[in-house]
Image: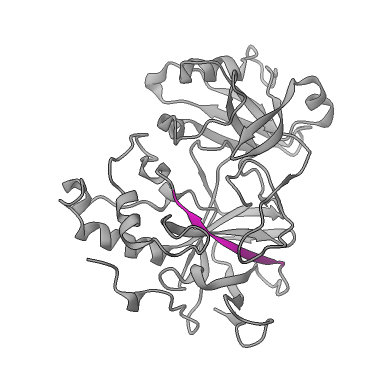
């Protein structure tokens, strides 16, 4: 059984399209944080994926694709206007790990970064300048070396690194071959957007596949949580997979009616990472990847065999996004200019 085509690609322009969830992931592949508002720049949401964990030997970024229990590492942001670093990033671990929590400066100063070891790390063909976080006495307790604690959790030498100042260019896309954009430790682009209705359709399809292709009986009732797909901005009101048809949107916050646009530069081709439960760190043998392969291939013209869920975005300026903000659809795929395809919804 496949998804009913009548449920797809029909933006509800007569209704409100609003922001229903905002998620940031301070450390790549670790647990995300749900927030009520977030500043953004052309490199994404503030504090999103500024940190990463790398193999100390190969200098390559480690993700939950290889080490699924990474999703159980919990970063918390504690802001402090009186701190020279704007606050701290507190990192904790599952109780059964026997790993101590630690904290690091939320925004290390330039002077601090100069004292940290630096090197380029490898990720998806990119060479990213990074700084190894050293022990920092931020509280009254003894200093704790993040790399030592993380190495104990991973069972091999690793480092916690902070993104350096050198811009990391994003690759051009089929829709935007002249794209000029930069990112930090995101896989490819600054933002990932996804609609609630898209997730509802996938969950319905999942129910239909229980007992087939290794889909366990528990999926008759278990929810397919949107956090598995690690989006930044979640919408509601647009209709299933409406984001596939957007080329530029804007998110209007309060009385501001001229927010910078967000280019929807490409579909997001999914790997097996969404199979990892964000609650348990256990990888499902089938869900959702086998469902996606059944109903979401042929979406991306650059990778027709890859299953797509959500879209990659690039902000064209700076601003603030809040839950409940209205989404303005400025341009649809295939449109010319910003005329009849500009819809406030």
Please check the rendered image and state whether residue 147 is part of the magenta-colored stretch, yes or no.
no
Residue lying farthest bottom? 340
The image quadrant of residue 88 is: top right
Q: Is 184 left, or right, of 212 in this rendering?
A: right
Residue lying farthest right? 111
Q: Quick one: 334 or 264, which is closer to the camera? A: 334
At x 75%, y 31%, the residue is 108
Q: How many marks?
A: 0
Quadrant where the C terminus is found in the figure:
bottom right
* Residue 288 in view: no
Q: Could you say where residue 228 lies in the image, as x and y percent from the top left?
A: 41, 47
The image quadrant of residue 42 is: bottom right
Q: Quick one: 143 or 260, which is closer to the camera? A: 260
At x 63%, y 11%, the residue is 142
Q: Could you say where residue 71 lies in the image, as x and y percent from the top left?
A: 45, 35
Question: What's the colour scheme?
Answer: one colour
Q: Could you say where residue 80 lies in the image, as x and y percent from the top left?
A: 70, 37
Q: Could you say where residue 113 lies in the image, as x and y percent from the top left?
A: 78, 27
Quadrant where the N terminus is found in the figure:
bottom left
SS majority, magenta: strand
Q: Is 103 left, or right, of 272 in this rendering?
A: right
At x 57%, y 36%, the residue is 27
Q: As displayed, is residue 151 above or below residue 202? A: above
Q: Which residues are magenta?
A: 260-270
* Residue 219 in view: yes
Q: Quick one: 144 or 10, which is closer to the camera? A: 10
Please check the rendered image and state whether residue 267 is part of the magenta-colored stretch, yes or no.
yes
């Amino acid at each position: 059984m496949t998804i009913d085509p009548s449920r797809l690609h029909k933006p509800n322009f007569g209704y409100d399209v609003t922001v229903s969830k905002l998620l940031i992931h301070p450390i790549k592949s670790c647990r995300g944080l749900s927030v009520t508002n977030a500043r953004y720049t052309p490199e994404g949401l503030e504090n999103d994926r500024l940190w990463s964990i790398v193999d100390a030997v190969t200098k390559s970024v480690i993700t939950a694709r290889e080490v699924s229990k990474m999703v159980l590492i919990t970063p918390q942001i504690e802001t402090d206007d009186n701190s020279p670093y704007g606050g701290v990033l507190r990192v904790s671990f599952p109780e059964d790990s026997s790993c101590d929590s630690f904290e690091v400066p939320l925004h290390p100063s330039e002077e601090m970064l100069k004292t940290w070891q630096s090197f380029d790390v490898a990720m998806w063909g990119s060479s990213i300048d990074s700084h190894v976080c050293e022990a920092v006495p931020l509280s009254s307790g003894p200093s704790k070396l993040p790399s030592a604690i993380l190495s104990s959790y991973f069972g091999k030498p690793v480092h916690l690194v902070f993104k350096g100042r050198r811009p990391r260019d994003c690759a051009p896309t089929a829709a935007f071959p002249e794209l000029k954009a930069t990112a930090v430790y995101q896989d490819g682009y600054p933002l990932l957007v996804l609609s609630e209705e898209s997730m509802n359709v996938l969950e319905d399809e999942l129910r239909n596949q229980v007992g087939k292709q290794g889909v366990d009986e528990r999926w008759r009732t278990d929810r397919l949580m949107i956090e598995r797909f690690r989006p930044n901005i979640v919408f509601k009101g647009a209709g299933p997979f409406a984001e596939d048809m957007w080329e530029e949107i804007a998110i209007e916050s309060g009385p501001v009616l001229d927010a910078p646009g967000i280019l929807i530069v490409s579909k997001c081709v999914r790997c097996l990472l969404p199979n990892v439960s964000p609650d348990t760190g256990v990888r499902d043998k089938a869900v959702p990847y086998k469902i996606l392969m059944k109903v979401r291939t042929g979406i991306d013209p650059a990778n027709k065999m890859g299953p797509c869920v959500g879209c990659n975005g690039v902000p064209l300026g700076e601003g603030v996004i809040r839950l409940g903000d209205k989404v303005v659809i400025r341009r649809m795929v295939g449109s010319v200019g910003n005329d009849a395809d500009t819809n406030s919804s």
